[in-house]
Image (cartoon, helix red, strand yellow):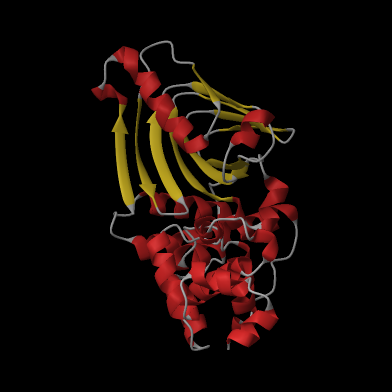
Amino acid sequence: MIETWYRTADLPAADRFDYWHALATGLCGPVTISNLSTGPFHAEGRALDLGATGILTDAKSGFSLVCTEAQARRQGQERCYLTLVEDGLVSCDQDGRQSTLTAGEMIIHHSMSASATSAVTSGRSRMLHFPRSLLPPVAHGLLATKLSGREGLGALVAGGLRELAALDVDRDEEAVRLTGITLDLLAALCHRELGTERPAGTTPAALLGQVRAFIRQHLGDPDLGPATVAAAHHISVRYLHRLFQQEGQTVAGWIRDRRLENCRRDLGDPALRERPVHAVARRWGFTDSAHFNRVFRTAFGLPPGEYRKLAHVPAQVRRALN
């Protein structure tokens, strides 16, 4: 994990809001943020980067945030945010739902193509941010809806957020596991709030099929790896490795082989003949050309450029050459 601390009190008063504004837009994307504080703006906090996910604990002065539909569309990856208010008052308006939160309450909001506004009084909060793909499907029915974190399942979700925020930076494995548990508890809470049944348990074979389908859908993401895959399915990295080991495979090896097969297919496609080799590789998650050339040659016996030339030679010519 990567740990970042920030504190505006270390800066001149005139620079404090601009400094925090840059941090906030770096996390939330292109949004409009206004200072509601009547005095010098104050913010301090700790951010933990867990890879695909992250946890932020902070205390700050009042501000308002507006994200228009146009701004939401300009954001890259769609992300979701689970926020626990520890102190202060937070109002949120998104998807036609309006909520006002006080200490001990939570809300799920997102960066998808929908306008959103929020206003925060001075106070403390903890926020877990993660890709939309990790949001439990049932939680879509409770986006921008106030959830209690004071009792029952809600208290367990809030406890998961607090435990994540308190982790030391060298607890990567625990962070991935705890993130999955927290999101799983969030799913259970949403099922209870909506009055729906919890999905039945999944067998290892069925889970492996779901994992492989997820990997195929995200092969173009260069950050795709065991930690991301495990978090998406609310399991530990260790259990994910065990699923593949039972098939005589490794997670990284299976991802690499699927990427290579897709690259081989594209290089042999006449319709993609003008697409540069490096663009084909990048499309399927290979960002290092030298590494791609090595693993492709190891897998198929030829560098990718030579393979493409041979693949585009008419079949009768190849037979004559052989």
175 left or right of 108 in image: left
With respect to residue 306, does 70 lie above or below? above
Q: Position of residue 87 (x, y in %)?
A: 45, 33
Q: Position of residue 34 (x, y in %)?
A: 51, 18
Residue at the image point whose x is 53% and y is 47% from the top: 150
Residue at the image point whose x is 51% and y is 57% from the top: 282
* Quadrant including the N terminus: bottom left
Residue 209 found in image quarter: bottom right
Q: Position of residue 196 (x, y in %)?
A: 75, 60
With respect to residue 288, does 293 lie above or below? below
- Residues 283 and 180: in front is 283
- Can you name the residue that lies furthest to the left here? 10
Residue at the image point whose x is 63% and y is 74% from the top: 313
Residue 18 found in image quarter: top left
Q: Position of residue 61 (x, y in %)?
A: 42, 22
Whether residue 131 is visible here, answered yes or no, is: yes
Count of labels in the image: 0
With respect to residue 289, does 301 lie above or below? below
- Residues 257 and 58: in front is 257
* Quadrant including the C terminus: bottom right
